[in-house]
Image (cartoon, helix red, strand yellow):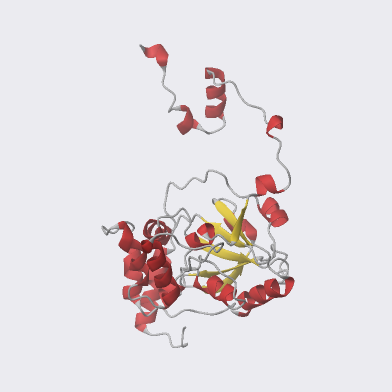
């Protein structure tokens, strides 16, 4: 954690952090999130996974072999509304360079997201998880370990798949903890809620089947380096899709006729790239 002294090395680290947080060009979400729908669907204690488009996001997605590069915890209406009338912050997250902050749902309205919900969480434990995260607001992480951040400037390091995840663990310090999901994992560890499967092979118990998976789970637990992907793959977190949460009738969908007329309409609506993938048979 930050000691409060702002040294030259620390300032350099924060400059590197800001560079890693800069957005990459060309990002287009498949299913952007609607803040109102998310608000209606999310429950306190839920984890919102995000497919980020920052420079650091590309490295995390590559190293973890996952779509998800960021995670935030939903705290509901526990935080007060801003005095200036702005949107109430309902997510608590850790941002590289900024530390633990609270943000509104609208921050991720242009991103692909996924809701991970702990199964059977008691009201008391739900409150403990939320209170833990809120209690960490304002925490700043030490950015002096610039060598820790250098790995994220290389989005696709030439290493075997089995070693990519361990690149996050090797020599990690505060910068890595500030971009991974360690704080959320710590909140759930505090109530003894599991994330990854147990190692045991006892009958009727969830377990990792392969020797590699068991080794990897032990490694992750030892270093407390949980990533967004772990909540997605966890057998103890339910995947909640807002489009299905309040009922879905596929019969009510209106399907277009795959004709040139529909392609022209798609182009007019701004979906030109998709239309251009349809071959023009009239040119033969």
In the displayed image of the protein, which residue is found farthest to the front? Answer: 203
Q: Residue 282 lies in what quarter of the image? A: top left
**Residue plotted at (55% across, 59% down):** 235
* Residue 154 can be seen, yes or no: no
State whether residue 204 is above or below residue 141.
above
Q: What residue appears at the point 34 percent right and 58 percent down from the top-left corner? A: 155
- Relative placement, left or right, of 2 versus 242 is left
Q: Quadrant of residue 253?
A: top right
As drawn, 94 above or below 267 = below
197 and 148: which one is in front?
197
Q: How many marks?
A: 0
Which percent across, then down, holds residue 247?
Answer: 73, 43
Which corner quadrant holds the C terminus? top left
Q: Is 164 on the left or on the right of 277, as rendered? A: left
Residue 220: image x %, image y %? 42, 70
Question: What is the x, y in percent for residue 102?
Answer: 61, 69
Write down the quadrant of residue 86 in the picture: bottom right
Is residue 140 visible from the viewing direction of this image? yes
Q: Nearer the viewer, residue 269 or 182?
A: 182
Q: Residue furthest left?
A: 158
Report x, y in % for residue 130: 66, 73
79 left or right of 31 in image: right
């Amino acid at each position: 954690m930050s000691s409060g002294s702002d040294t030259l090395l620390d300032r350099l680290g924060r400059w590197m952090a800001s560079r890693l947080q800069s957005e990459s060009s060309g990002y287009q979400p498949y299913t952007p999130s609607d803040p109102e729908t998310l608000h209606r669907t999310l429950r306190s204690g839920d984890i919102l996974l995000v497919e980020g488009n920052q420079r650091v996001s590309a490295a995390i997605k590559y190293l973890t072999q996952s779509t998800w590069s960021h995670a935030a915890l939903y705290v509901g209406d526990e935080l007060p509304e801003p005095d200036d009338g702005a949107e109430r912050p309902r997510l608590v997250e850790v941002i590289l360079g900024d530390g633990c902050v609270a943000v509104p749902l609208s921050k991720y309205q242009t991103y692909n997201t996924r809701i991970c919900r702990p199964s059977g969480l008691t009201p008391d434990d739900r409150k403990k998880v939320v209170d833990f995260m809120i209690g960490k607001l304002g925490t700043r992480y030490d950015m002096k370990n610039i060598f820790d951040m250098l790995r994220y400037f290389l989005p696709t390091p030439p290493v075997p798949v089995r070693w990519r995840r361990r690149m996050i663990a090797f020599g990690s310090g505060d910068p890595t903890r500030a971009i991974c999901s360690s704080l959320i994992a710590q909140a759930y560890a505090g109530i003894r809620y599991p994330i990854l499967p147990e190692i045991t092979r006892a009958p009727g118990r969830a377990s990792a089947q392969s020797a590699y998976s068991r080794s990897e789970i032990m490694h992750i637990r030892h270093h407390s380096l949980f990533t967004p992907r772990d909540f997605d793959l966890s057998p103890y977190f339910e995947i909640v899709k807002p489009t299905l949460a309040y009922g879905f009738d596929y019969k009510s969908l209106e399907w277009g006729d795959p004709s040139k007329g529909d392609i022209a309409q798609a182009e007019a609506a701004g979906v030109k790239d998709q239309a251009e993938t349809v071959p023009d048979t009239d040119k033969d």
